[in-house]
Image: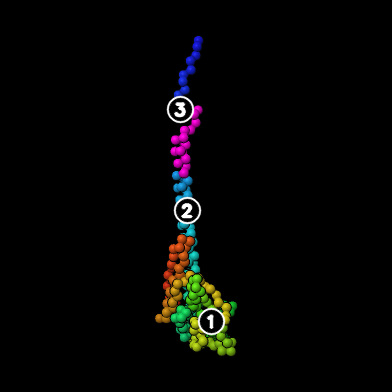
Amino acid sequence: MSRFSSPPTEPAARSRRGVTLLELLIASGLVLLVALSVLALFEAGVRYVRESEARLDIQRDALVAMALVTQELSESNPVAFRTDPDPPGVVFGSPRNLEGTLIVDSSGKLIWQKFICYYLEDSGAERRLIRKERMLDPTVRVSFPPAPGAGLSTADFLVLPIPARTIAGGIESFAVTPSTQVDIELTAARRDWKGRDFRVRLQSSVLMRN
C-alpha cells in the first residue's frame, strides 16, 4: 500500500516561513504606540507632581508666615503698634522674652519685653518677609504698652545690625492695616519649572488683646 502525504496547509507553511516583514512592521508600530502612550502618561504624571509641589510649597510658606504674624500681633496692644510704607511692614510691642516666655510682675501684670518688626525686603531676586526683634532696656520695661516712637520704624529696623529671620520668600505684597481689628494681607508667588507663576493671597484679622 502506498501512502501519499497531502501538501502543507497555508498556516503551517507560514509558520515555517516565520514572520513576514509586513507583520513585523505592524507589531513594531503597535509596540511603539503603546510605549509612546506610557511615556505621555508618565510625563503628565511628573508635570502634575511638579505643579502640585509648587502650589503646596507656596501655600505652606504663606500659611506659616500668616499664622506667625497673626499669633504675635494678637499678644500686642494698639498703643504699642505702628505700620510703615517703606519698607512695608509693622512694628509692635511684645510681652515675651528672648526665650518666648510671657513675663509678669508681682501683681500679675504683663511686663513688655521687646519690639517685633515684620517688613518686606527686596533682595533683587525675590521679596522676602523678614522678622527682627529689639529688646527693651531692662531698666525701662514697664507694665503699660510702650509706643514705638522715633527710631523704631520699619526703615530703622531694616538697617539695625541685629539678627534677621527670613519668614518666607517669594512674597509679592505684605500689608497690615489698623481698624477695629488689625487686617493683614499677604500675597506670595512662585514660578514653577516651566516658568508659570502660581500665586496665593491670604487675608486675616486679629484683635490685639493685651
Q: Amino acid at mark 3?
A: Pro
Q: Residue at x 46, y 79 (%)?
A: 88
Whether residue 177 is situated above or below residue 190 in the rendered picture = below
Give the Cα distance between marks 3 and 1: 89 Å
Give the Cα distance between marks 3 and 2: 42 Å
Q: Residues within 10 Å of mark 1 (few under 14, many from 20)?
A: few
Q: Amino acid at mark 1?
A: Val
Asked if residue 69 shows in the view, the reply is no
Give the Cα distance between marks 2 and 1: 47 Å
Dot label at residue 143? none
Mark 3 or mark 1, earlier in chain: 3
Quarter of the figure with residue 174? bottom left
Mark 3 or mark 2, earlier in chain: 3
- The residue carrying mark 3 is 11
Q: Amino acid at mark 2?
A: Glu
**Secondary structure category for the residue under label 1:** helix
Give the farthest residue toward the front.
Answer: 21
The residues colored magenta run 15-32
**Residue 24, image x, y percentages:** 47, 36
Whether residue 191 is situated above or below residue 70 in the rendered picture = above
Q: Residue at x 47, y 57 (%)?
A: 47
**Secondary structure category for the residue under label 2:** helix
Asked if residue 196 shows in the view, the reply is yes
Please state which of residues 189 and 32 is positioned toward the viewer in this rendering: 32
